[in-house]
Image (cartoon, coloured by chain):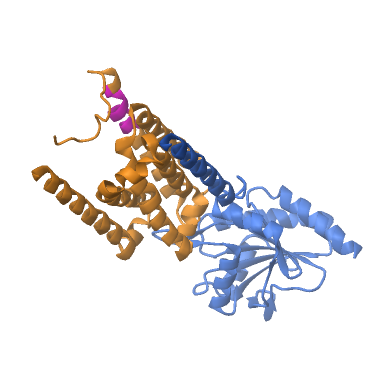
Amino acid sequence: MASKSIRRFLSHSSLLVGIAIACLICLTPVGQILERTLVGHVLIEIPLLVVAGWALGAAIKPYLHRALGYFNGGGISGLLLVTFTIAFWMIPRWLDASLQDPVVGIAKYTSLIFIAGMPLGLSWQRAGFITRGVVKLEFLAMLFRLGWLYLISPERLCNSYLISDQSALGQTMLLIGGLLCVVWLVPLFVGAQPEEGSSAPSTS
Amino acid sequence: MSKWLTALAISGILTAGILSIWVGTEGGLAWTAESARRLEIRRQPLLLDNYPLQSTKGGESTLVNNSKSLQIVDFIYTSCPDVCLAMGAEFRDLQTVLSEFDPANRVQLVSLTFDQENDSIEQLQGYLEAFGAIGARWSAAKFSKSEDLHSVLDELGVVVIPNEPHGFVHNAAFYLVVSDSVVGIFNIDDTSQLIEEVKWHLSQLGAS
């Protein structure tokens, strides 16, 4: 009984957190301020939108868990959707377009919340150790690929940003990639065998 | 049952995902906004409106030119510290190359300023002099109305952003205008393709 009400409370607070972050970015000048720099746009705004979606996904999970189970075995469909959605917004053309064209801007906000963040929140717990590993590796690879590209490109890839901004993004991506390598990979070699779902915080 | 549905969902998402990236980059050809715009103008030349300009040639003129001539256009501002200097130097080189196969000046070079506030005709004249522009070949101009400038920049996909502490940055390119349409957008650091195309258009115009 107690655990049920705690769960309900968590679900509600997660819903509020998700809505709060989404509103903060989409409806207040915060989004525009973050979009002034490439680092703010790609490494703060986009992740925040995904986090907002994740929180919303976590909030509605209890209601959808069974129904989604049919389509989302092992969380693979959901995580694939997340990967493609994020990859799409990493295309410089569309990142640029989201600033120049309000329709594309709205598409970016909604897709990152509802078809990146939300499926991530709905799928991560379902994913096994191997699936999580693949997703993490792909994420690292994306950071290194894009980081390198942005760092060495002599041309501006986005019309809306300066070249110095672009190399700053490249450096930051490589730095985050390096840090995540340590955080994610070192525990695999040091210490006990990882357990399934060990990276998920558990209160039980 | 659930395995099959999951497999179905995975194949659907894979197809939609690959398709959206394929379509979103025109089959892998347009990863940046600039390359997308170039591709679009290649497929469908951009018809220019008859915007009035004030030219260093004196009096009013317009970009639209129905006579048998070609124009290579770029956007500059005279207080520009870097990329416009590179473009000015490229135009100077183009001037030399063009005189070899087009002594009649059928190919015109036009530098348009996007600094409506600060660039006067006198300043544009100074810019041309600084690069040793030959008057019959290379002129500079400003739009008579600022809104015309903005609609042209918009149509060409030029984004001008402020570069602190001074100046602007924009996606610089050379625009090839044949009579009344922009038919191609070219890199400023390699004009060989532009020259080839100019020669081809000249031969077409000469033949007709």
What secondary structure characterizes most of the magenta part?
helix
- The blue-coloured chain is labelled B
Asked if residue A164 lies left or right of residue A20, the reply is right
Q: Colour of chain A?
A: orange
Q: Quadrant of residue B150?
A: bottom right
Residue A50 percent across, percent down from the top left = 34, 49
Q: Residue at x 46, y 64 (%)?
A: A103
- Whether residue A183 is in magenta: the answer is yes
Residue B154 percent across, percent down from the top left = 56, 67
Asked if residue A66 lies left or right of residue B36, the reply is left
Q: Quadrant of the N terminus of chain B?
A: top left
Magenta range: A178-187
Q: Is residue A91 above or below residue B61?
A: above
| Most foreground residue, A177 or B107 | A177
Q: Is residue A131 above or below residue B81?
A: above
Q: Quadrant of residue B106?
A: bottom right
